[in-house]
Amino acid sequence: MKRNLYLNVQDKETALQNFLSAFEDISPKKEWIPVTESLGRITAEASYARYSSPSYNSCAMDGIAVISSHTKNASEDCPVLLAPEKDYLEVDTGDMIRPPYDAVIMAEDLIEAEGGFRIIAPTHPFAHVRAIGEDIVTQEMVLPSRHEIRAIDISVLISAGIHEIPVIKRPVVGIIPTGDEMIDYRETPEDGRIIETNSWMFQNLVTENHGVGRRYPIIKDDPVKIRSVVSDAVQDCDIVIINAGSSAGRDDYTVHAIRDLGEVLTHGVAIKPGKPVILGKVQGKPVIGLPGYPVSAYLTFVEFVVPVMHLFIQQNARPPKRVPAKLSKTLMSGLKYEEYVRVKLGIVEGELIASPLERGAGASMSLVRADGFCVIPQNREGIAAHETVSVELVRDMEQIGKTLVLIGSHDLILDVINDRMMEETKDMCLSSTHVGSLSGLIALKKKEAHLAPTHLLDEKDGSYNRTITREMFPDEKMVIIKGVRRRQGWIVKPGNPLSIGNISDITPEVRYINRQRGAGTRVLFDYLLKKEGIPTKNIRGYEHEAATHMSVAVAVQKDNADVGMGIYSCARALGLDFIDVTFEEYDFVTYASYLELPFVQEFLKILRSDAFKAKLEALGGYSCEKTGNLIYL
């Protein structure tokens, strides 16, 4: 098979408009379904009541049904005695009110007396009576066309005597995962194999957007097989998605399958991530090739599959909610693409702060952690730090407003604290962005975070965090919230095959993985190199950086490195060996005034709790003698 090149890279708006215009003849189909199964469906036409509700004059309160004219002379000075059967009948809510009775007096307004009830105020016709058709009148429109049916709507429809309702038929979306390396999630992944997950994401995105997802088995990178399955799917489905194989690689056959069966309208869109999207038409139906990387797959589904689904249900997309936010750090970008950057959001001193997350197309956890997307327009090289940007929200602003923002060093305990905070408060949470200790303190100084997790060593006296905090915040009232003492050392493969014992054993033949600049672990490693007189050029992999301790451990586990510096709990979590170097102090720096914030108070409560300390013991490698203590500077 001849290697494919992109047909034509278009900007997003042009590509989408051309794609949708190719299906202008699509019209919604109608089907009848039971009202009791119609939640979330969209009405195909107006529905009209078969019955009035109530269908009779109905008692609205417990009490007595009366003839209103018999009560006209009642007053406090001259009570009226009502006799049973002659003047009233006892009734309960929902009872039918028959002539000659035409009103109801509530039980609490009655004075029990010998021979009946006394009343001290007159009533009027239809007092506390629900008249025929008060709620719904026969032949009244109950729901209009193009209405998304809610739970309350179902109750009203049933009251109106409507048992079946015409709704727009949901488009069936065929989902075809491809790739030699892909395996079912029920299989155990070995090296060279990847659990296929995108099709499950697509199926649920289809459901969220009023469609029916139909997943096909994973197809190997066989052009004949792919073409055959796509051909069958086009017969059975309204829309077909082919996942992966949409780029220009050796085994990327999607574009050939679409071209052989129909027409390729666009191959390549100027968005990042997501460039290798294919928009095609086969037998009058939309066929879309989506990239395999999870973030690219998600974004291109939202941008191209959802709009074409809306053609089938004749619904306009709800405009995304956008908010202005201050960017916490500079974002560089290329001029060729419109780039979508995932961000975490938090409100610090009344200002909404957007902190960028990992930008890789395969970083699926960035989608889980993201509160929104910041878009860097095409033909712009980036956005400067502290500039106001527009963020498209994927999380509710109420939740974001109850988020404690941490920017700085990484540790597994941050996830533990967040989990405890969510469980204890039900609405507060912790957001952590891992940029290293020094960058976290800079973010705190700029009022872009509430707390900065840090473990920066003072080479002169061996202390942690105090010196740098005094230097960076000379005129501020600061507090160090004591965190944990943790074991820092060398993470190596099981059995320590290279016999790493100290820094002098990291010879030029040994592959090292470093932490990013400004990270406390990087500062410690540089200090040890300087102390032993070892130049950084002698460290193979000194420029190979990881953002978290867990990333270091994974690199060693998967043989991308022989050794890296990190914390014991990460080595233990992945079954790796660990050689101690030192115990270091992992603390949280903040402004004294922030201690009064409700989520900081909750943070302190969790730090000091027995449940948190028990979790630390289970993780291993921590001690917490001073955890939760406050040091004022």
Image: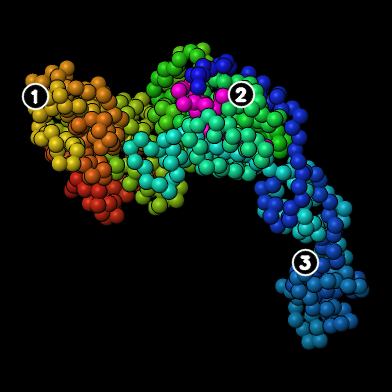
The amino acid beneath tag 1 is Lys
> Residue 531 bears which disc, if any?
1
Q: CA distance from mark 3 to mark 1?
A: 87 Å
**Residue ID for mark 2:** 259
Identify which residue is drawn at 52% across, 33% down: 243
Quadrant showing the C terminus? top left
Q: CA distance from mark 3 to mark 2?
A: 68 Å
Q: Nearer the viewer, mark 3 or mark 1?
A: 1
> Residue 627 bears which disc, if any?
none
**Residue ID for mark 3:** 60
Q: Nearer the viewer, residue 477 or 413?
A: 413
Identify which residue is drawn at 50% across, 22% down: 1
Q: Is residue 3 left or right of residue 210?
A: left
Question: Which of the two labelled residues, at mark 3 and mark 2, occupies the earlier sequence position?
Answer: 3
The amino acid beneath tag 2 is Arg
SS of the residue under disc 1: helix
SS of the residue under disc 2: helix
CB under 8 Å between discs 3 and 1: no
Q: Nearer the viewer, residue 432 or 483?
A: 432
Instruction: Reply yes or no: does residue 254 show up in magenta.
Output: yes
The magenta-colored residue range is: 238-256
User: Horizontal and vertical percent for residue 289?
Assistant: 56, 29
User: Horizontal and vertical percent for residue 176?
Assistant: 55, 37
The amino acid beneath tag 3 is Ala
Q: Quadrant of residue 148?
A: top right
